[in-house]
Amino acid sequence: MALTIVWFRRDLRLADNPALAAAIGRGQPILPLYVLDETPGLRRPGAASLWWLNKSLATLAGDLEALGSRLILRRGIAADIVEALAAETGAACVTWNAVFDPGYPERDARLAQDLKAGGVEPRRFNGGHLVNLETVRTKTGGPFSVFTPFWRTARQMVADTGPAPAPAPATLPAPTAWPTSDALADWKLHPTTPDWSQGFSAWQPGEAGAQGALDRFIATGLPTYATDRDRPAVEGTSRLSPHLHFGEISPKACWRAALAAAHHGGASDSEVEKFLAELGWRDFNAAITRNRDGADLAQMNFNPTFDAFPWREAPGELAAWQGGVTGYPIVDAGLRQLWATGWMHNRVRMVVASFLTKHLLLDWRHGEAWFWDTLVDADHASNAGGWQWVAGSGADAAPYFRIFNPVIQSQKFDPPGDYIRRWVPELARLPAKLIHAPWGATGQELARAGVRLGHTYPAPMVDHAFARQRALDAYAEMRSRSGNPIDPLLAATD
Ligand code: FAD
């Protein structure tokens, strides 16, 4: 009997997986496949993502085995592998869920044509986003480049979305013979020399871990989400981002769970709407990526005026930023949280990104690349979107001249300094009023807390007032190069 190949990509789950549900609907044996894609020109995952992928694939393989099935693993140029496997097994159909990163839609379209030419039916689904990104359009039929109208339209489309998602199947029909598979361990995705992943142990990659994170968040985080989401010392956000990136849970399942909580009085409408809008930002970033016709927004400014921006090159300063030794406690705490756990709180992502692009005047692409390698939730669209949003060059971006003061941000969002104490332990004994800016403490106060600036903890690598003026000057230079000088009255800080 002919079989159906389900090509798992960024949808490492069994529940609410349209490509899998469609394959089951065909009533044929199912061959689950994952390819470690080495297609030239497609971006390879960073090291932290590979750590996650390793565990997520092991979990998916175990979940499939419990259904009487298997996960076939292959490595190489994905289109060639899918075509060859279809021929080898006599498959009648290949199903997959769309990925919109640069190069994917074009590659997938070519593969679909080739499969069709070979008598194999290709079927593509939307399993990764709340809405079909290709159909969210302005009244004149174009793509959106501003979040609020995008979300107004997309939110209505999700609200209109029909039946409840398919649950995980209880069993999967297996082929009579299984093709060969790589051994996951042979891919060596787990870091060894050194193994830097000890601090990643709180994560539980895989579908069960994703559902657990959602349940926890709905019970404890959602009721106070709108306020606590900005406090990095508090577990006020869902930490679903790596699960969503790898598709271990569908955004629609998160959507439905949040609305159900509102319905049962578990959270107010405003908290729920705030959470849904953040899921909306994920779709917005993906739609921006999708609509750029293959242009890589991890490389190109969305706003080409920024092509004239006079970025500095300072490898030593970049290394200090990466290593979390800038001398600004909130910045260092964020970068150390990232290195230790593979994740950083959103508020602090904005602060460290602003520090890199404005205080140090280093190109946002350096920061994007660092996050790409170190984040377990590294996501092409959201990472490039986040960096360009902060740098001012992105779609619906924060204006460049809005320069975060890292001390004020720290005092506002981590008033007791708990987040800093957790990640910058050498400052832990400083009282709350000094911990955000230890250079303002007297020698006696520092000595009492066991801090020696420049020895146990660095002095600030750049003065805030100087850096702010330098950034505004650079911005003005860019504007004058592009024939649109800056209005100094617009310059603001927060
Ligand atoms: P929650 O607050 O619980 O939000 C729920 C979900 O909504 C998240 O899991 C995420 O999928 C989505 N979401 C929330 N905020 C945003 C946002 N601003 N943009 C897009 N989606 C959002 N997010 C990534 O998933 N991958 C990245 O590589 C990434 N890089 C970023 C880089 C920078 C410089 C900045 C400023 C933000 C970046 N973000 C990225 C967005 C955001 O920081 C994370 O999605 C969020 O911190 C994840 O934590 P959470 O799951 O607890 O979020």
Image (cartoon, grey):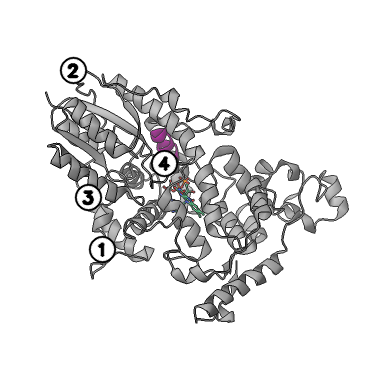
Q: Residues within 10 Å of mark 2 (few under 14, many from 20)?
A: few
Question: Could you tell me which secondary element the residue under label 2 belongs to?
Answer: loop
Q: Earlier in the sequence, mark 3 or mark 1?
A: 1
Which quadrant would residue 173 be assigned to in this image?
top left
Question: Could you tell me which secondary element the residue under label 4 belongs to?
Answer: helix
Q: Horizontal and vertical percent for residue 280? A: 36, 54
Distance in Å between CA atoms under marks 1 and 4:
31 Å
| Residue 166 seen in the figure | no
Q: Are marks 1 and 4 in contact (CB under 8 Å)?
A: no
The amino acid pointed to by label 3 is Thr
Q: Are marks 1 and 2 in contact (CB under 8 Å)?
A: no
In the picture shown, does residue 428 fall above or below 394? above
Furthest-right residue in view? 444
Q: Are marks 3 and 2 in contact (CB under 8 Å)?
A: no
Q: Which residue is mark 2?
A: 176
Q: Earlier in the sequence, mark 4 or mark 3?
A: 3
Q: Residues within 10 Å of mark 4 (few under 14, many from 20)?
A: many
Q: Are marks 4 and 3 in contact (CB under 8 Å)?
A: no
Q: Earlier in the sequence, mark 1 or mark 4?
A: 1
Extent of the magenta region:
209-218
Task: Tally the marks.
Answer: 4
Q: Earlier in the sequence, mark 3 or mark 2?
A: 3
- Left or right of 243? Residue 132 is left
Distance in Å between CA atoms under marks 4 and 2:
42 Å
Question: Could you tell me which secondary element the residue under label 3 belongs to?
Answer: loop
Q: Horizontal and vertical percent for residue 177? A: 21, 18
Q: Which residue is mark 3?
A: 161
Q: Residues within 10 Å of mark 3 (few under 14, many from 20)?
A: few
